[in-house]
Amino acid sequence: MDPKVVFETDRLLVRDWAEGDGDRVFDIYRRWEVARWLGADPRVMADRDTAGRAIERWNERNKDAVFGVWAVEEKLSGVVAGTVLLVPLPEPADSPGAGEVEVGWHFHPDAWGRGLATESARGAIRHGLRSGIGEIYAVVRPGNIASLAVCGRLGMRPLGLTSRWYGAELESFVI
């Protein structure tokens, strides 16, 4: 069975993960140049089995009609270039129930510099706004020049540094 396509852009299919995507997931997340920007305690993916478990977790999350952690597949090649996500942000202690939503992206280095992160994130934002979400945030580690530039290309408004989410000081943006 083919994975469900959530939305398309000119060059991309954004879809649920397929079992056969495991090698590519591992190849993306085993790289320090990708993993160094992710999570409160960045670390590379340890092994291929971890990739399979991540796919299962993501697809479970993708059952929601609005939110998900999706594969970004290039239409021409059929290669998974990376991940785009639209997920609820963790609720901060100072305002539980805030219902804030994050857009994010993680791409293989062989997909960098071609506008794929911007294109997929723009599609995820459009998907969220059409679903009734009023504001969408992005959080980026300081120093991640490429992702900071994506936020700018998306037209996101910078909010400055915050430790509101994920237990790390991050640059925050909203659209």
Image (cartoon, rainbow, N blue to C red):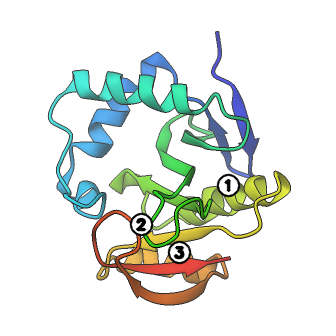
Q: CA distance from mark 3 to mark 1?
A: 13 Å
Circle 1 sits in a helix, a strand or a loop, which is it? Answer: helix
Q: Which mark is residue 167?
A: none
Q: Amino acid at mark 3?
A: Val
Residue 117 vs residue 170, the one in the foreground: 170
Q: Is residue 108 visible?
A: yes
Q: Which mark is residue 93?
A: 2
Position of 162 with respect to 76 (left or right) is left
- Residue displayed at 54% across by 50% down: 84
The tag earlier along the polypeptide, 2 or 1, is 2
Q: Which residue is mark 1?
A: 124
Position of 155 with respect to 93 (left or right) is right
The tag earlier along the polypeptide, 3 or 1, is 1
Q: Which residue is mark 3?
A: 150
The tag earlier along the polypeptide, 3 or 2, is 2
Residue 146 vs residue 92, the one in the foreground: 92
